[in-house]
Structures are given as C-alpha cells and as structure tokens.
Amino acid sequence: MSEAQRRGDAVRLRVDIVTIFPAYFNGPLDVSLIGKAAARGDIEFAVHDLRRWARDAHRTVDDMPFGGGPGMVMKPDVWGDALDDIAGAGPATLVVPTPSGLPFSQELAARYAAQPRLVFACGRYEGIDGRVVEAMRARMPTDEISIGDYVLAGGEAAALVITEAVARLLPGVLGNASSAGDDSFGGAAGAAGGPRYMCGLVEGPVYTRPRSWRGHEVPGVLLSGDHAAIARWRRDMALRRTAAYRPDLIRALRDLDPRDQQVLAEAGFPAAGDGPGAPPARFPVGGEDMAH
Ligand code: 6GU
C-alpha cells in the first residue's frame, strides 16, 4: 500500500495497458517521476497480457488481412473481449496508439491528466481490426493517437511516451509545481503558473555552474539579477530556437512585439504570423553570440 493510499487519498489517475508484450513495461513504470508517482499512489498501473483473451491453444491474436497485403492484423474478437473486461468498469478514455492517429500534443496530455482513467490498447503487426475502434467509440471516448511522423513496431513505446507526458502534469507529481509551465509548449497548453513569454515557443538553452566551462561562458544577463532582462533574453532565445527548428510554430504566433519581430527578422522571418516565412540562413540556437 502506498503513502497516499494509507492517508486515504484517492488515486488521481488509473492507467491500464493491454499488450502482447507486458514485459516491455517492466522497469519503465517503476523508475523516475512515474515510479515515484506510482509509489505515492497518485497514479496506478495495471498491465494486461492480451493473450489471456485468446481463444485457441496457440493463443492466437492475429490473422491474415482481408483484401490481401503484407503482414497480419490483430483479431477483433480477442481485443473486444479484453476491452470489455478491462474498460467495462467506470468511466475511462480508450487510447489506441497508431501512426495514423491524431498527433499527440501537450494540450492532449493536459486533457488526459484531468481524466480518472486511461486504457491503452497497444497494437502490433499491421494494426488492430478497424471494427474494434468503431465498436468502442459507441461506448467510451476513444482516441487514435500518433506520437510523431515515423513508424514504430508497436504501440508500447507510444503508450509510455503518452503516460510520461500525462503523469508529470498530475498535481504534486513534479518536484517544483511551477516547472511544467516553463517548458516548451507549456504556455501554449495554458499550464497554471507558466510565464506568458514562453507561450507557443520551444525553450532556449539553460545553464548551471560553473560560470566558465572549457572556455564557454554562461551568458552574462543570467547573472545580472535583472528579472525583466532575463525574461526578455529567454524569450529571444526561445524565438531563435523555434525559428530554427520549428518554423511551423512561428507561423502560428500572434501578438509579436517589436523586439520579437526584430529577433525573428534576424533569424530569417521577415513577417512572422503572415506568409510562409523564409527558412533561416543559419541555425542560431545557442546563447553564445547573443547581444544583451
Ligand atoms: Cl502511436 N504507434 C506506432 N506503431 N507507430 C507510431 C506511433 C504509434 N506514433 C508514431 N509512430
């Protein structure tokens, strides 16, 4: 029994994971931030072996695709029985990781962190028979989610990614309650306590001691104690890094002040917010040559 459960606190989030590789989750759920949250009872996990619901002696979970093509498709009857048993009790959101899903985002992570229960259906092979999602949609909120534009061998890694992004947003999970708002995308997600100046941007570089390392100095403004200047510098760096790596985010920015416009112009964006924006001439993502 966890501390929280001894205190009588309710578990904030229950996560069920259905997979043919339950061993994949041995370890990752027990360490770091997620492990501590689980030990405190803020989050509770159950990992289920899909083959428990297989019907034959070989515990078959897949079959050949109708219409032909390569690979195998996961059987609807096995998944249907598993999800009936697991997701049947109480309100839950079904998350089906798939490269053809809705892109995962900080906004979605925040929405999931407010749910009492998530059930992940991890597919392998060419995916799960399409009727499973169709049937579950009629019964519970069901999201097909992609974690990026690349193809994984199965949904397990994606389920871990989504779980970690959600777990760190649970109240009391982060050591410093305000640090979630400081992150890349944090302001965009409207996280409480996050500085407005990072809204919609990825973060710039961060520094710690020593002040001088291998001939590289920490930017002087960070040692100045001038909080307004530090905030402005951090926004400048975030704008430059976002321009270099994520021009798509720059085009979505609104309410740019004259200094923002100047920083973006230097980074190769003549008029951010309208028009496609030119690619940056170089990748000015470091802090070393920044005037302040
Ligand atoms: Cl959620 N699953 C798989 N198999 N591949 C992916 C993915 C998910 N997101 C990106 N690639």
Image (cartoon, rainbow, N blue to C red):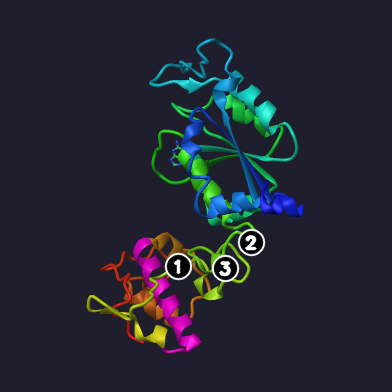
Q: Is residue 274 above or below residue 112?
A: below
Q: Residue at x 29, y 67 (%)?
A: 283
Q: How many marks?
A: 3
> In the rendered image, which residue does mark 3 sit on?
176
**Spot occupied by residue 1 in the image (x, y as percentages of width and height):** 68, 46
Q: Amino acid under label 1?
A: Asp
| Residue 155 screen position, x and y as percent | 48, 36
Magenta region: which residues? 224-245
Percent x, y of residue 71: 40, 21
Who's the residue at 49% across and 47% down the image? Answer: 161
Relative height, residue 63 to residue 271 (above, below): above
Mark 1 vs mark 2: which is more N-terminal? Answer: 2
Specify few, some or many for label 3: CA neighbours under 10 Å numbering under 14, 14-19, or 20 or more. Answer: few
Q: Main secondary structure of the magenta part?
A: helix
Mark 1–mark 3 distance (CA, rounded to whole Å)? 37 Å
Can residue 9 be seen at all in this image of the molecule?
A: no
Residue on which the image places disc 2: 172
Mark 3 CB lies closer than 8 A to ligand 1 = no
In the image: residue 222, left or right of residue 288: right
In this rendered view, identify the residue nearer to me: 230 or 275.
230
Per the image, label 2 sits on a secondary structure element best described as: loop
- Residue 159 included in the magenta stretch of the image: no
Q: Amino acid at mark 2?
A: Gly
Residue 81 vs 270, above or below: the answer is above
Mark linked to residue 274: 1
241 or 24: nearer the viewer: 24
Q: Is residue 170 left or right of residue 7?
A: left
Task: Give how far apart the Cα atoms at labels 2 and 3 are.
Answer: 8 Å
Q: Distance between the Cα atoms at labels 1 and 2? A: 40 Å
Tell me the residue at 33%/65% (across/down).
278
Residue type, label 3: Asn
Q: Kindly state the secondary structure of the residue where label 1 is placed.
A: loop
